[in-house]
Amino acid sequence: MAKAKRRRGRSIKERIEHQVKTRDDDTRDFRPVLDFSNAKKKPANFKPQKGKQRISILPYTVSGNNHPDLKEGDMDYKLQIYIHQGVGVNNDSIICMNRTFGKPCYICEERKRLMDDGYEWDSDEVAALGSSKRCWYNVEVPGQEDKGVQIWHKASWKNFEKRLCSTAEEDYEEIIIFADLEAGAYVDFKGVENSFGKIKYIDFENFSLKERPELSEDKLDEVYQLDDLLIIPTYEEVKALFLGMDTEETEKSDDEEEETEEKEKEEKPKTSRRKPKKEAEEADDDCPFHHTFGTDCNKTDDCDDCDEEIFTKCLDAQENMESDTKGKKKFKRK
Ligand SMILES: [Zn+2]
């Protein structure tokens, strides 16, 4: 078979093949949180599946370079940090320097500014700028020995680590040191498909710990020193990554802004959008009784006396507005 004719750069065939292979690879960030480019070899990414599975979590020696709690030579079995997700035009993940190390973080500051502007803490805008606690692990999977030590990226602390620790502490007579080389245990659990809005993810349940063969000290040469691989961005780098999107948006004309709002009805709300809702304000005067047109329909006694045509329009507006605001911000007026 003749080779595909090559123009500049990648062919569409290569591009599609790559996309097909990596379509489920949520660790393929444009900007990684950990940098493995100088590692002895690039580890395989562990990806939890649906159904029962068994993994072995391995310890590593802390390098002391970037560990949030431990110092050089200490042992750990995970790297637990806070990250902001969906940052900038490429939806990157980036460490939250504030919650991980107590240092300034532009995104956390922006989140606070939104709340100072009147956005509720649980509004989509504020939530989008929140950070979540995530863990990285060195793991081995029985039956996948050819892959060697794999890295589990961005595992949910809440759905995995916390439940694992609770199993290790509460389900056995003594605390199981599951990542210990000598006294360690296999971690068994069940992956269950779950969803949050449109996003599907694997949740974890039915944890149990099973005796595993003793591992030699040599294992410590195979694992990755996770804290050493952590990328520590400067404050300015975080700000630039975050504002990559904002800058673009502020360049939009008012005409374009209207189009954007149309599109947003179908889209997930974006981070750092700071416009209070305009419709209700503009329509205020349309109510003959000076209530908020399209918002207060049928909520006051005055509505009984309202002209039927205005009342119907107001009701329509309210219904449209309710569907528009689904999944959108809550804005508290001062
Ligand atoms: Zn932060």
Image: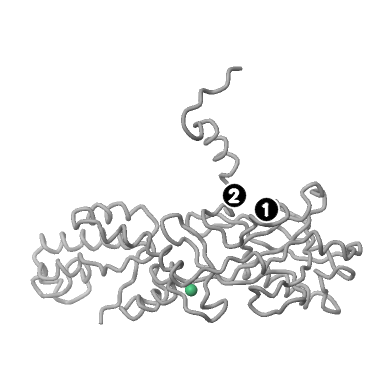
How packed is label 1: few (under 14 Cα within 10 Å), some, or many (20 or more)?
some
Residue 135 coordinates in the image, percent (x, y): 64, 67
Q: Amino acid at mark 1?
A: Asn
- Disc 1, SS: strand
Residue 15 coordinates in the image, percent (x, y): 52, 36
The vertical placement of 102 against 191, above or below, is below
In the picture, which quadrant includes the C terminus? bottom left
Q: Amino acid at mark 2?
A: Asp
Nearest the viewer among 256 and 216 is 216
The vertical placement of 202 against 118, above or below, is above
Check residue 45 in the rendering and tell me which mark sits there, or answer none: 1
Residue appearing at x 56%, y 72% in the figure: 82
Q: What whole-number distance in Å separates the C-alpha atoms at marks 2 and 1?
A: 9 Å
Tell whether circle 1 marks a residue whose Cβ is less than 8 angstroms from ligand 1.
Answer: no
- Left or right: residue 64 compared with residue 323: right
Decide which of tag 2 and tag 1 comes sooner along the chain.
2
Contact between labelled residues 1 and 2, with CB atoms less than 8 Å apart: yes
Residue appearing at x 51%, y 55% in the figure: 199
Q: Quadrant of residue 202?
A: bottom right
In the picture, which quadrant includes the N terminus? top right
Q: Residue furthest top?
A: 1
How packed is label 2: few (under 14 Cα within 10 Å), some, or many (20 or more)?
few
Q: Quadrant of residue 193?
A: bottom right
The vertical placement of 221 against 331, above or below, is above
For disc 2, the marked residue is 25
Residue 17 coordinates in the image, percent (x, y): 57, 35
Residue 27 coordinates in the image, percent (x, y): 59, 54
- Disc 2, SS: loop
Nearest the viewer among 157 and 91 is 91
